[in-house]
Image (cartoon, grey):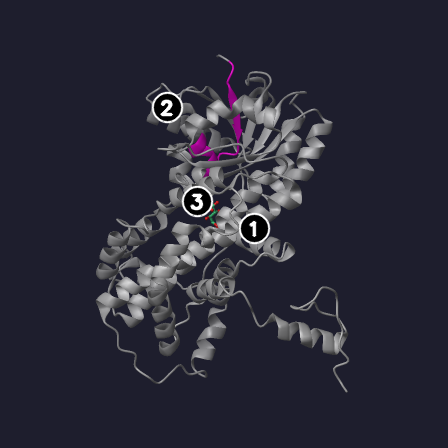
Amino acid sequence: MTQSQIGLAGLAVMGQNLALNIAEKGFPISVWNRSPAKVDATVARAEEEGKGDYPLQGFHDVAEFVQSIKKPRCVIMLIKAGKPVDATIEVLSAHLEEGDMIIDGGNEWFPNTERRAAAAKERGIEYIGMGVSGGEEGARHGPSMMPGGPREAWDRVAPIFEKVAAQTDSGPCVTYIGPGGAGNYVKMIHNGIEYGDMQLISEAYELLKTLGGLGNEELQAVFEEWNGGELESFLIEITAQIFARKDDQGAGGHVVDHILDKTGMKGTGRWTIQEAAGKSVPVGTIAAALDGRFLSGVKEERIAASKILKGPEETVEVDRAELIKDVANALYASKICSYAQGMNLLRAASGTYDWNLDLGSISRIWKGGCIIRAAFLDRIKQAYDRDANLANLLVDPEFAAELNARQASWRRVVQLAVRAGIAVPGISASLAYFDSYRQARLPANLVQAQRDLFGAHTYQRVDREGVFHTDWVE
Ligand code: 6PG
């Protein structure tokens, strides 16, 4: 057997599919998993899909696995974040040698990557934290990948991942992100934006369904149409597919109507909000999406509350065609705000941690492969190409013109929702973000006065330099 160019540890859904993708691209790969059954399943799949041509070898023994990889070795782990990663590093490190490299391809909390990188460095091992997005399909046929860590180490393996990544008209969906935990951080923001997109789409669904009275077939048609225009994206596309799917459990109708309205979560969206609060970056749309998941979680309480609390009595009449157009505009404008928030948090982190993040190339590698892939990411990339120091996507001339042109629709949608008692936290948080950000003056002067009155916290004035305190109670 020839020595493999790369090793992959962890053969759950993502690992198995990424291994097959790497093998399909012609890179000899060794695979290993704690439970041998997964190794055998991967080898069998490689045999079947590659008709014997995929250069993939499976190992039950970790020492043999490591020895089968060409030096200096590179092992990519696709393991559940947290303790299992530490355990796998321990097992692998016993057999790795100085100069070898470990890549963690999981959704890891970035300080964990930095801690592990420091420990690995003491053993002479390079460590890279790489966000991988795209789910099962992406892993198999081309994900978007966000690697962070030592640059020279990454450069050694970049050619493999450039072939394995999703390909777009502006290149493969992978680029070196920055040192330390920068790769995991960018993936975390990707997921925060993913939460925002999903919340906004679910609000659009609720409006069209409840106010517009659209059935699943009609919703499917609307989402398909949207996917042919400026909203074109993976999430809009799969939403159309979801509306088409009939139930096969004997309940009749469509699957979507039989799914319990409680959203699950693994936590990356929560980290985004924690980070945003720590860095004083406003990310209201993403926060609304997280709150939306929390509120969905208290199903029993909501059932009880629905019997006590009343909505508005008014019946809101709408013109369906107008509503569909307005919701599309509101969704698009809200999406711009949500991405602007995510990008601003990236910029803040880049400054704090000295990562020198390139927001244009990050937008570029999100154009394909990942969950938030969308036609509009090319426009974001162009906005940062025009001005790398853009203060906010909202003030890029093209996006500003689009927001201004859509605001009448956006306001109509929020008004209708409020009148009808339909919660649109993501769409309204986005509009509030837009309305706050475009104000030269906010009512924060009053908050400052209150702080000064009860706590002598002082304030600055608009008409002269300095710090002031007033004796408020005469
Ligand atoms: C991706 C996704 C993925 C994430 C799931 C579930 O980019 O492929 O972001 O990494 O784990 O979307 O996330 P939640 O369970 O937190 O919704």
Q: Which residue is mark 3?
A: 383
Q: Which residue is mark 2?
A: 47
User: For residue 356, which quarter of the picture?
Assistant: top right
Mark nearer the viewer, 3 or 1 = 3
Magenta run includes residue 17: yes
Q: Which mark is residue 345?
A: 1
Residue extent of the magenta highlight:
3-18
Q: Position of residue 365 (x, y in %)?
A: 44, 37
User: For residue 19, which quarter of the picture?
Assistant: top left
Q: Position of residue 434 (x, y in %)?
A: 46, 62
Tag 2: amino acid:
Glu
Mark nearer the viewer, 2 or 1 = 1
Q: Label 2's element? A: helix
Per the model, the C-alpha gap separating discs 3 and 2 is 45 Å
Tag 3: amino acid:
Ala
**Mark 3 or mark 2, earlier in chain:** 2
